Image (spheres, rainbow, N blue to C red):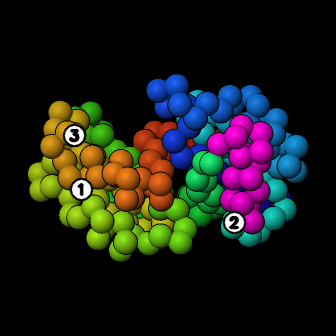
Amino acid sequence: MISYIAFLRGINISGKNKVPMGELKTNCEEIGFAEVKTYLNSGNVAFSCNQDDKEIITKQLERMIKDKFGLHIPVFVISKDELQDVLCHAPDWWENANKEVYDNLIFIMRPTTFHEVFSEIGPPKDGMEQIGNYKEAVFWSFIRKDYQKTNWWSKTASANISNVLTIRTAATVRKICGM
């Protein structure tokens, strides 16, 4: 069996797109996933299955969410090994001990590429934020007190790009990877 992690985009935010984690876990088990665990209330699911095609798994999850919850929710699926590889390639400046800096990992939904995301959002604002990419992930850090002044903060939520991104904090990603 292969260990996977699925990040559901945009659920349980301000009372919108409600997906109870207990029900999500049960529904994942019903479609054949094993060792299903959820983390937090924001659509983080760790599981195992024999399927080695992430596109098929993604479609299974999206279809199940549509059927069971009536929602069209984009899903990003990554194997646990791939996620560990991404974390091993984190830039030195990402996830350091500086509490004034907020570290995130942005996952880019297939088939969108980093180049397309960067073309839409643009460069990070000097002195306030940093980005670095590796495969389908973007390491993004910003100064907490200046987050509203950053380039990437508002633009990751823009209508043109938001549906192809899902963002998790560094701490959340590390926790999920360790599950």
> Is residue 164 something one can see in this rendering?
yes
| Main secondary structure type of the part rendered in magenta | helix
Residue 147 tag number? 3
In magenta segment, residue 78:
no
In-image side of 153 versus 56 (left or right): left
For label 1, the crowd category at 10 Å Cα-Cα, with few meaning under 14, some 14 to 19 and many 20 or more, is many
* Distance from Cα at disc 2 to Cα at disc 1: 29 Å
Task: Please provide percent x and percent y for residue 101.
Answer: 25, 40
Name the residue located 37 percent from the left edge and 59 percent from the top edge: 160
Residue 179 tag number? none
Where, quadrant-wise, is the N terminus in this rendering? bottom right
Which residue, given by chain and number where applicable, does mark 1 sit on? 130
Mark 3 or mark 2: which comes first in sequence?
2
Residue 54 tag number? 2
Residue type, mark 3 in image = Tyr
* Element class at badge 3: helix
In-image side of 101 versus 179 (left or right): left
* Distance from Cα at disc 3 to Cα at disc 2: 33 Å
Name the residue located 44 percent from the left edge and 48 percent from the top edge: 167
Mark 2 or mark 1: which comes first in sequence?
2
* Element class at badge 1: strand
Task: Please provide percent x and percent y for residue 16.
Answer: 53, 31
Instruction: Give the residues drawn in magenta, as a range.
Output: 56-71
Residue type, mark 2 in image = Lys
For label 2, the crowd category at 10 Å Cα-Cα, with few meaning under 14, some 14 to 19 and many 20 or more, is some
In magenta segment, residue 66:
yes
The answer to whether mark 3 and mark 1 are in CB contact below 8 A is no
In-image side of 80 versus 152 (left or right): right
